[in-house]
Image (cartoon, grey):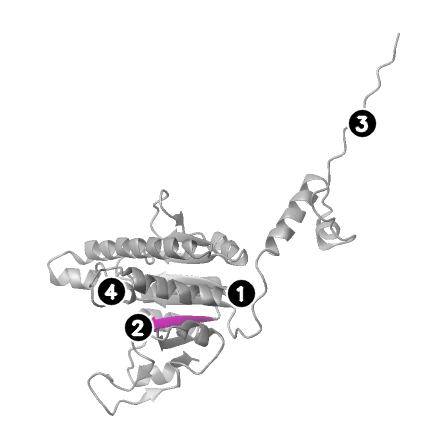
């Protein structure tokens, strides 16, 4: 009677470079087989995002955009296509430097909760309407960025799974590590909190190097430069100085959150077509507020 012999399983072709002998994956955890294959894939994914350009002073930033920056000048459209493209081109410019970019977008070009209250809309309802406006703006940014070759994810503080991911801190950090721009919409998910507060909160959670607050003014002044010709611009300020002089940098909740968590704020004018890149590489622009 013939003896049946077990045939050896065909060897699996190696598709990834081997881990170095005694490397941390094998030595620290003693993994092999499927686990080692996962480790190789994970290590490869971690290398997908190129290192930041040495010119970049900041490597992880939160860009705070007012919804008003998307409004068309002559057309008056809530989202002007040409303006949107200019903003996205600036985001792409710093993304190409290898900077990890988060964007927090407002909704004032569509609906502002405080204005709704003046029209008889309940404050809580108005704030939720404003949050939905930020979702529209965020999707517009995502669509434009994807079309110019920037991989982008939208995360919402209010669950709406068909159109955006829920905000999950570790997932957001993973997107950044893989070189994706992450857009945070729907504010904090709670009424009575501004998108400035959202920017301060996300920057604190993600350990961002700085908040880049893009506005229509080229910095912080001691008084309104549109009303007073003798207004003086500050190149830099401490949080305490800004509080003492009652300077309107951000709302008080957002400002105190940045001060407590040591998150600097750079206020600058988005009108310059390379303003965001100049801010990231440390050129003299706007007003820096820090501890």
User: Where in the figure is residue 267, as x and y percent of width and height?
Assistant: 36, 76
Disc 2 residue crowd, few under 14, some 14–19, many 20+, Cα 10 Å = few
Nearest to N terminus: mark 1 or mark 4: 4
Query: What residue is disc 1 on?
Result: 98
Instruction: Say if mark 3 contacts mark 4, CB within 8 Å.
Output: no
What is the CA distance from the residue labelled 3 to the residue labelled 4?
69 Å
What is the CA distance from the residue labelled 2 to the residue labelled 4?
29 Å
Query: What residue is disc 3 on?
Result: 8
Could you tell me if residue 207 is visible in this image? Answer: no
The secondary structure that most of the magenta stretch takes on is: strand
Could you tell me if residue 114 is visible in this image? Answer: yes
Q: Nearer the viewer, mark 2 or mark 1?
A: 1
Q: Nearer the viewer, mark 1 or mark 3?
A: 1
**Label 1 residue SS:** loop
Image-based side of 114 in relation to 247, left or right: left
Q: Nearer the viewer, mark 2 or mark 4?
A: 4
**Label 3 residue SS:** loop
Q: Nearer the viewer, mark 1 or mark 4?
A: 4
Magenta region: which residues? 210-215
Task: Out of 97 and 82, give the one closest to the viewer.
Answer: 82
Image-based side of 116 in relation to 205, left or right: left
**Label 2 residue SS:** helix
Nearest to N terminus: mark 3 or mark 4: 3
Query: What residue is disc 2 on?
Result: 252
Nearest to N terminus: mark 3 or mark 2: 3
């Amino acid at each position: 009677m013939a003896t049946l012999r077990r045939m050896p399983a065909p060897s699996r072709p190696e598709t990834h470079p081997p881990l170095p002998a005694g490397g941390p994956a094998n030595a620290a955890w003693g993994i092999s087989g499927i686990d080692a294959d996962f480790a190789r894939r994970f290590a490869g994914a971690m290398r997908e995002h190129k290192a930041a350009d040495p010119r970049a002073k900041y490597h992880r930033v939160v860009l705070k955009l007012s919804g008003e920056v998307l409004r068309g000048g002559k057309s008056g459209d809530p989202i002007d296509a040409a303006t949107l493209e200019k903003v996205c081109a600036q985001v792409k410019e710093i993304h190409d430097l290898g900077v990890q970019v988060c964007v927090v977008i407002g909704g004032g070009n569509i609906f502002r909760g405080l204005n709704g209250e003046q029209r008889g809309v309940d404050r809580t309802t108005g704030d939720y309407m404003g949050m939905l406006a930020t979702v529209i703006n965020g999707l517009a940014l995502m669509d434009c960025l994807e079309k110019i070759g920037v991989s982008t994810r939208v995360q919402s503080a209010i669950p709406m799974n068909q159109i955006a991911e829920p905000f999950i801190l570790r997932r957001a950090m993973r997107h950044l590590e893989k070189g994706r721009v992450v857009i945070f919409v729907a504010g904090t998910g709670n009424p009575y909190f501004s998108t400035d507060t959202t920017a301060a909160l996300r920057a604190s959670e993600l350990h961002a190097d700085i908040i880049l607050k893009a506005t229509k003014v080229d910095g912080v002044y001691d008084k309104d430069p549109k009303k007073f010709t003798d207004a003086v611009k500050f190149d830099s300020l401490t949080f305490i100085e800004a509080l003492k002089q009652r300077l309107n940098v951000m709302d008080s909740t957002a400002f105190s959150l940045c001060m407590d968590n040591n998150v600097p704020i750079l206020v600058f004018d988005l009108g310059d077509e390379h303003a965001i890149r100049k801010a990231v590489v440390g050129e003299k622009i706007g007003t820096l507020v820090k501890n």
